[in-house]
Amino acid sequence: MQKQFTRKFLNNKGIAYLIAVIFLIVAMLMGISIGTVSVPALDIIKIIGSEVFRISLSGDVDPMHINIVMNIRLPRVILAGLVGASLAIAGAAFQGLLRNPLADPYTLGVSSGASVGAVLTLFFGISIPFAGAFTLPLLSILFAFITIFIVLIFARQIDRSMKVETIILTGIIFSSFLGAFISLMIALTGDELRQIIGWLLGSVSMRGWEYIKIIFPFFIIGSMILLANSRELNAMSFGEERAQHIGVNVQKRKMTVLFAGSILTGAAVAVSGTIGFVGLVIPHLTRLLWGPDHRHLLPLSILTGSGFLILADLVARTIISPTELPIGVITALIGAPVFAMILMKRRVERRG
């Protein structure tokens, strides 16, 4: 009886969305409230409400709290949420496309490719005419897409059947190579690029509202493309041949999903650096809890990925305060064991 109740509870998608939204709201309130100066949750609601509805605040709210919320913590929390949401939905789409829970922007080398694009842009001071501040994400997206394209070509040369394990192994190889290339660039250029090492490890510290403006349009475009292809991802998760039999243009949808994932990953890397394992852990846990239907898996991954990275950033900036850890360190500490557990589980299932 209890198992049936639990199953019905987990299968209720309305409850799933309610839990995910509550998780995100609590994470946001904690991210804004907790710090060197603690801001009460009621003050946060008053401050944000006054900005949204253009209502003047009463004198019982400390002006220092207003400054902390609006100029420091709220933009940081929103940026962390957008980055987490982008990586989570991209990871969910890659896992559905490749039919493997080990696939994500980090293991496929997409994040590393985007990082190379960002570093080259910063190092050479590249600026695309009329693009302005969007030069960095545009070139990150371009390099992210080129990387996944090369990974697929290289994997095809190794294994004509293009087994998923071959693609992931190739992605990890390219990720390691590109990471070494970035390290070499930093070592050769001296202090000029050493300051971005922390950025490459992942950070949303002191980014401000302008970075939210940079990532937001790419997040909307990439997410809408993937959500529009959720039914096709459901079909392809059962195999490409079966998807073709029911009328899915597999090659076209593949390229569409890979392109949208590259948009999301490239924009996220451009504003926050390389943050690994979010696209691996969140979709996997969301799938375990609420099922593999991409019509719900993708939006739920957005909500839970957003809340997860906000909390990871909170831990990164408070665990050894006043020193901040790179957020990528926290996600790696959580993600690497999960990666190992998934790998071991798949090995056991195959032997069985």
Image (cartoon, rainbow, N blue to C red):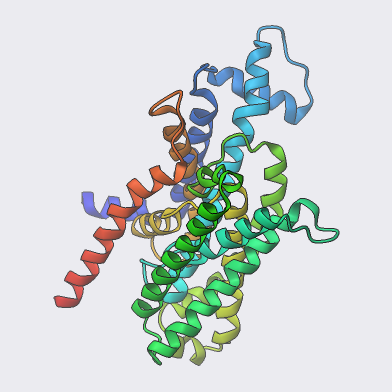
In the rendered image, the vertical position of residue 26 relative to residue 162, given as above or below:
above
Residue 169 position, x and y percent, is 36, 74
Residue 178 position, x and y percent, is 49, 65
Image quadrant in which you'd find residue 350: bottom left
Does residue 302 appear in the picture of this structure?
Answer: no
In the rendered image, the vertical position of residue 108 relative to residue 210, given as above or below:
below
In the rendered image, the vertical position of residue 340 relative to residue 155, given as above or below:
above
Q: Residue at x 48, y 33 (%)?
A: 26
Residue 88 position, x and y percent, is 49, 56
Q: Residue at x 76, y 28 (%)?
A: 53
**Is 82 positioned to the left or the right of 58 in the image?**
left
Residue lying farthest left?
352
Question: Is 83 in front, or is 325?
Answer: 325
**Is 139 positioned to the left or the right of 296 in the image?**
right
Q: Quadrant of the C terminus?
A: bottom left
Q: Residue at x 54, y 70 (%)?
A: 230
Q: Residue at x 45, y 62 (%)?
A: 180
